[in-house]
Image: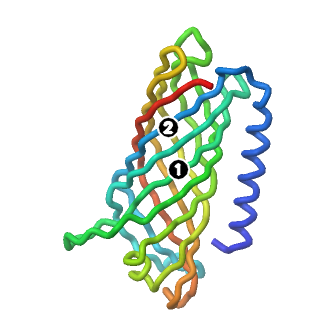
């Protein structure tokens, strides 16, 4: 992903998220949600791709990914919600020789558009929900992984995904269970050319299961 295109996309996401969240500032107290989740990614794969020729790529299966996420959301409509989320997740490719790499780390900052359908009389109580994830991500690579493809720098890019789950609330708090699918695309400079190029794209795709706690605020 070229730097100019990436900068434009990231700027658009930031402006959209700020505008959408600002429109909910007048919402009544206790209508919002604050959620903290433990996330586990399973299966999935990563690809190292030549920016100039996407047919040149290296494919790797992923080990389990572990992380945490914190989200804050507010309603702007009976069923429509917007929010922001930050998270950090440790990941690594599978290895066949028993040697385990230290985990690389993704740090995400996301905008969350969500459709939430309550199944209690309280319109801001327990609910099923589904929505998207769109935002920034930073990929911070451990030395042993970076050195495997010509000492790549840390990279930055886009995080997108889908999510669906259920929240069970009793009074002001409760639990949440969620299933999601995450895609991250980051751009990395390399010390030695890979695919005859000094920059590569790292693409990460993985399903995710999450459990956590939710409170109204």
- Label 1's element? strand
Please, is residue 48 above or below residue 164 in the view? Answer: below
Where residue 201 sits in the image (x, y, percent)?
A: 54, 73
Quick one: label 1 or label 2, which is nearer the N terminus? Answer: 2
Q: Residue at x 47, y 27 (%)?
A: 166
Instruction: Name the secondary structure under disc 2.
Output: strand
Query: Looking at the picture, how far across and down is residue 69, in whole percent?
Result: 50, 45
Residue that badge 2 annotates: 36
Task: Give me the residue at 79% from left, 26% from top.
Answer: 26
Please name whichever residue, 149 or 212, is drawn nearer the observer in this view of the structure.
Answer: 212
Quadrant of the rendering where the N terminus is positioned = bottom right
* Image quadrant where residue 91 sits: bottom left
> How many numbered marks does the figure carry?
2
Q: Which quarter of the figure has residue 61?
A: bottom left
* Label 1 packing within 10 angstroms: few (<14), some (14-19), many (20+): some
Picture residue at 61% right of the left edge, 60% below the top: 158
Task: Please tell me the numbered disc located at residue 87.
Answer: 1
Q: Residue at x 77, y 31 (%)?
A: 25
As drawn, 168 above or below 83? above
User: From what the image shows, is residue 84 above or below residue 184?
Assistant: above
Q: Position of residue 124 (x, y in %)?
A: 61, 18
Left/right of residue 20 with respect to residue 37 in the rendered view: right
Q: Where is residue 211? Give x, y as percent.
A: 41, 36
Q: Camera-side residue: 36 or 195?
A: 36
Dividing the picture into quadrants, the one containing residue 144 is bottom left
Report whether 4 appears left or right of 215: right
What residue occupies the far left of the structure in this picture?
A: 98
């Amino acid at each position: 992903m070229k730097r100019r295109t990436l900068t434009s996309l990231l700027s658009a996401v930031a402006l959209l998220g700020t505008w959408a969240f600002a429109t909910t500032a007048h919402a009544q107290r206790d209508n919002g949600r604050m959620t903290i989740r433990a996330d586990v990614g399973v299966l999935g794969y990563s690809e190292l791709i030549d920016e100039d020729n996407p047919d040149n790529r290296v494919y790797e299966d992923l080990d389990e990914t572990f992380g945490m996420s914190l989200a804050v959301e507010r309603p702007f409509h009976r069923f429509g919600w917007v929010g922001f989320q930050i998270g950090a997740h440790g990941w690594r490719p599978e290895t066949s020789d028993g040697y385990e790499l230290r985990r690389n780390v993704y740090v995400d900052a996301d905008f969350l558009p969500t459709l939430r359908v309550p199944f209690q009389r309280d319109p801001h109580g327990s609910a099923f929900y589904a929505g998207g994830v769109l935002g920034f991500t930073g990929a911070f690579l451990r030395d042993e992984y970076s050195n495997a493809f010509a000492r790549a720098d840390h990279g930055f890019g886009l995080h997108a995904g889908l999510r669906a789950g259920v929240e069970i609330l009793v009074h002001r708090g409760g639990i949440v269970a969620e299933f999601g699918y995450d895609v991250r695309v980051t751009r990395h400079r390399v010390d030695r050319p890979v695919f005859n190029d000094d920059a590569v794209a790292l693409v990460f795709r993985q399903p995710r299961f999450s459990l956590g706690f939710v409170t109204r605020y």
